[in-house]
Amino acid sequence: MGDTFLTIKSPSEGIYKEKMSKFLAFAFPVASAAEAKAHIADFQKRYYDARHVCWAYMIGAERTEFQSNDNGEPSGTAGKPILGQINSFGLTNVVIIVVRYFGGIKLGTSGLIVAYREAAKEALTAADIIECHETEDVSFTFPYLAMNDVMRLCKGSDVEIVGQIFDNSCEMTLRVRRDYAAGLKSKLGDLDGVVVR
């Protein structure tokens, strides 16, 4: 299915040491580029004393939205190797941040590439990799009299209720796998008084 992807279940960490330099790697599951950038900004503040805070992220089931940053390391020696590990593991909706504490000995271009790659790999090796699905929120209004019919459609294991207001006129938002959304909208539209937004 086109909406299925692999990501990590929860944050994970890894560490790689080379010639007195320490590379601390942190991987986080994220749902958007904005969320990834919030983690990056947080780490840049938290590790203000580190020489470099390099990172890469990948977003979306199609794996077409990604970015990486060398944060002052020679071009292509940090962000790209980190992104390379995200690709090697076939992941998306993930950000990896690698914090470098310089040990006083230069590693050279190839040494840096290896260090950032290995640090990112350590963080991903420690992570629980899970299969997820792209989701879509379906919002609609309906008269109270249609409640039983609507609730019957919500009973499926692949439907999550994310918002609801019950009154004379009711509102509901359901979260479903993206490839099930059109079918759900169609079923809802067949019910009396239901208006899908």
Image (spheres, helix red, strand yellow):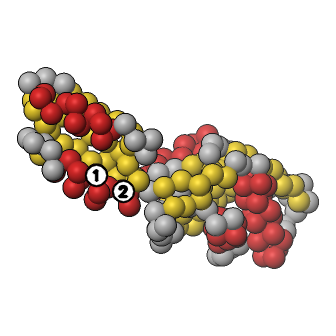
- Left or right: where 76 falls relative to 115: left
Q: In which quarter of the view is residue 166 placed? A: top left
- SS at circle 1: helix
Q: Residue at x 36, y 56 (%)?
A: 180
| Crowd tier of the residue under label 1, counting other residues whose Cα lies within 10 Å: few below 14, some 14–19, many 20 or above | some
Residue of label 2? 180
Please say whether residue 192 is visible from this viewpoint. Answer: yes
Vertical placement of 37 versus 65: above or below?
Answer: above
- The spot of residue 14 in percent (x, y) is 77, 49
The kind of residue on which mark 2 rests is Tyr
Q: Which mark is residue 184?
A: 1
- Left or right: where 95 falls relative to 120: left
Q: Residue at x 41, y 53 (%)?
A: 177
In this rendered view, identify the residue nearer to me: 99 or 122. 122
The kind of residue on which mark 1 rests is Leu
In this rendered view, identify the residue nearer to me: 132 or 145. 145
- The spot of residue 135 in percent (x, y) is 40, 53
Q: In which quarter of the view is residue 42 placed? A: top right
The answer to whether the residues at label 2 and label 1 have Cβ atoms under 8 Å apart is yes
Q: Whole-Å distance between the Cαs marked 2 and 1?
A: 6 Å
